[in-house]
């Protein structure tokens, strides 16, 4: 049985999943990891989602204020044994709903070229590649995305 629940970054299960995410990113990013980790701190993140499968926390994601229009998607992760089941998409959709409830109209995010699964997820969820923003400007290993959430609503 699947269960999504909203929480914050003090949630023990969210923190454990993020620790596993950081370990995986350390391997994938290699020497570049220190650069990215400075932007992945939990400071300022008030909205997190954890997905449980049969009462086991298996995935997470979060959103953080970016500007007056957009929330930034952060800390998306699903345990390797649970990938390919649509769980990341479920977490992302919940974060998008929450973004709309908070009166923002878009989500933005950054991922890396070393994460092709993440790039495929965001493309499949109708995110559009945009010029790298903020600290990722000029970083050739980063890919940034944006999705206008109101455009998904029927008129």
Image (cartoon, rainbow, N blue to C red):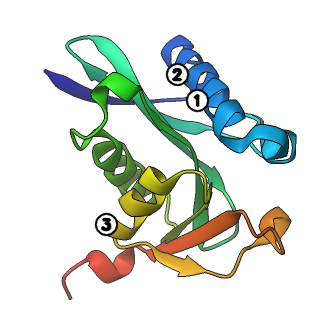
Q: Is mark 2 on a helix, strand or loop?
A: helix
Quadrant of res 91: top left
Q: Is residue 126 above or below residue 12?
A: below
The x, y position of residue 150, in whole percent, is 37, 78
Q: Circle 2 is placed at which residue position?
A: 17
On the rendered image, what quadrant is the N terminus found in? top left
Within 10 Å of disc 3 (Cα), the crowding (few <14, some 14-19, many 20+) is: few
**Residue under circle 1?**
21
Vertical order, 139 against 58 (above or below): below
Please tell me whether residue 24 is drawn above or below residue 138 in the rendered image: above
The image position of residue 131, as x and y in percent, is: 68, 82
Residue 117 is marked as none
* View extreme (left): residue: 1
- How many numbered tags mark residues here? 3
Residue at the spot x=71%, y=43% of the render? 29
Q: Look at the numbered discs 1 and 2 and tell me whether their residues touch, using CB distance below 8 Å.
A: yes
């Amino acid at each position: 049985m699947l269960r999504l629940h909203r929480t914050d970054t003090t949630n023990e299960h969210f923190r454990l999943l993020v620790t596993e995410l950081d370990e995986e990113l350390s391997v994938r990013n290699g020497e570049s990891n220190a650069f990215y980790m400075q932007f992945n701190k939990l400071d300022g993140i008030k909205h997190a989602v954890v997905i449980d499968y049969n009462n086991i926390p298996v995935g997470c994601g979060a959103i953080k204020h970016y500007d007056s229009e957009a929330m930034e998607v952060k800390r998306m992760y699903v345990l390797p044994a649970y990938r390919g089941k649509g769980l990341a998409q479920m977490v992302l959709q919940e974060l998008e709903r929450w973004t709309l409830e908070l009166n923002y109209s878009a989500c933005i995010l950054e991922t890396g070229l070393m994460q092709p699964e993440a790039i495929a997820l965001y493309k499949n969820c109708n995110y559009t590649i945009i010029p790298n923003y903020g600290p990722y400007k000029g970083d050739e290993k980063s890919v940034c995305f944006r999705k206008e959430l109101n455009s998904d609503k029927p008129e």
